[in-house]
Image: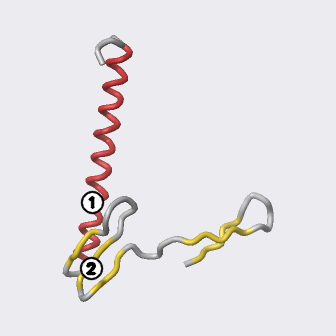
Amino acid sequence: MMNNYHTNRGKDFVAMSFRNDRFYCVNNEWFFSIRRGPDQGPYSSKEEAQLALKSFIADQRCKQRERQAEQELLASYRSISPRII
């Protein structure tokens, strides 16, 4: 699918493509695609795949918060004593 986006230069338009739907069905089995890694599935219905995607995203956000907290903790240790780590 192509969408036109208005630029800051007046009447110029930039065509950008993006995936309309990350869910797809193959042989009555549902999958969803992710940016990094293999597609996820199979699921018995699109609704089940949608719930799995929500769970996947929540898990990824939690992991991201954990990594950020670890990095902040390491940075605070380094500021106290650079020789510790």
Mark sitting earlier along the chain (2/1): 2
Quarter occupied by the C terminus: top left
Secondary structure of residue under mark 2: strand
Please state which of residues 32 and 7 is positioned toward the viewer in this rendering: 32
Considering every residue shown, the one lying at the far left of the view is: 44
User: Residue, x 38% and y 15% (percent of image)?
Assistant: 79
How far apart are the alpha carbons under marks 2 and 1?
15 Å
Name the residue carrying label 1: 56
Other residues around mark 1 within 10 Å, as few (<14) / some (14–19) / many (≥20): some
Secondary structure of residue under mark 1: helix
Quadrant in which residue 54 is drawn: bottom left
Which amino acid, by three-letter code, is at mark 2?
Trp
Which amino acid, by three-letter code, is at mark 1?
Phe
Point out residue 4 in the picture as x, y percentages from the top left corner.
65, 72
Quarter occupied by the N terminus: bottom right
Left or right: where 9 falls relative to 69? right
Q: Are marks 2 and 1 in contact (CB under 8 Å)?
A: no
Compared to residue 67, the image places residue 56 above or below, namely below
User: Residue, x 24% and y 72% (percent of image)?
Assistant: 41
Left or right: where 2 falls relative to 34? right
Compared to residue 61, the image places residue 26 above or below, namely below
